[in-house]
Amino acid sequence: MVEWTDFERATIADIFSKIQYEVVGPAALARCLVVYPWTQRYFGNFGNLYNAAAISGNPMVAKHGTTILHGLDRAVKNMDDIKATYAELSVLHSEKLHVDPDNFKLLSDCLTIVVAAQLGKAFSGEVQAAFQKFLAVVVSALGRQYH
Amino acid sequence: MTTLTAKDKDAVRTFWAKVSGKEEDIGTDAVARMLAVYPQTKTYFAHWKDLSPSSPSARKHGITVMKGVADAVSKIDDLKGGLLTLSELHAFTLRVDPANFKILSHCLLVVLSIKFPNDFTPEAHVALDKFLAAVALALAEKYR
């Protein structure tokens, strides 16, 4: 069981209430595909990913980025049992999508950087620590059903 | 990892020109974040009186680190040669586990993202990430 302090709970709820999922999701996924181009291996049917501009303007990337954020929302609403909440998603990513779990960390880092830009100075060291702890729990839950 | 292309170096130098003047703030913020987000990094600073992210020691260290990064930008065409002395320092005296270079790099990028939300584009991000990885590699050169 993950222990969350009051500060961490409040911080996560606050961050997700402030960010626009359809802005942050697409930006984070696009950034991941640009900064770590090998992650493009999972999006062979997304069309034009030839350069940063193409990636940032790609509607399938945008749609999937938003989907990811809505997926994170489920963890935000179930912080006391993220492991169970993500059991099915974990199986999906492992058995069907065959995503190397190391990629979850890459996307997490990009998400942190995009949220930092959105929140500016409000994204203090303590807020960053809470956010990264949350993402680490999510990443761990997503990797749990791999075998 | 990979070598820096001419395009990477240009992107780093262009971005760094914007950083000019703000190095101290960036360095102190990055180190403060590192200590707050990755508490295990505090183990390297047990000799400080005050380990809090906003302590004078942390601030001073942020400035020191940033001076090193700025120096690396100026030596971007030969990081291994240019950072030789720093590598020896990190290898024989400081003996910082190289995993921590990644941690500090990430914190640096977060600070840049906050301070330059419009300039820290995905293209600038990849160039700087590659650059910092190259710096880390050069710093670890003398480890073994």
Image: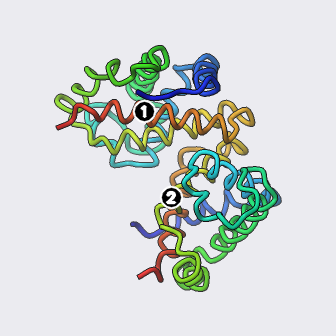
Q: Quadrant of residue B27?
A: bottom right
* Colour mapping used in the image: rainbow
Label 1 lies in what chain? A
Q: Position of residue B139 (x, y in %)?
A: 53, 75
Label 1 secondary element: helix
Q: Nearer the viewer, residue B65 or B95?
A: B95
Question: Which residue: 44% across, 34% down?
Answer: A29
From the image, tell me which residue sits under label 2.
B102
Residue B83 appears in the picture as rendered = no
Q: Nearer the viewer, mark 1 or mark 2?
A: 1
Q: Nearer the viewer, residue B20 or A105?
A: A105
Label 2 secondary element: helix
From the image, tell me which residue sits under label 1.
A137
Q: Position of residue A48 (x, y in %)?
A: 36, 36
Q: Nearer the viewer, residue B13 or A98?
A: A98
Type of amino acid at the residue the image marks with label 1: Val
- From the image, which quarter does the C terminus of chain B lie in? bottom left
Type of amino acid at the residue the image marks with label 2: Lys
Question: Which residue: 42% across, 44% down?
Answer: A106
Question: Which residue: 65% across, 44% down?
Answer: B113
Label 2 lies in what chain? B
- Left or right: A23 with respect to A66? right
- From the image, which quarter does the N terminus of chain B lie in? bottom left
Q: Position of residue B91 (x, y in %)?
A: 52, 80
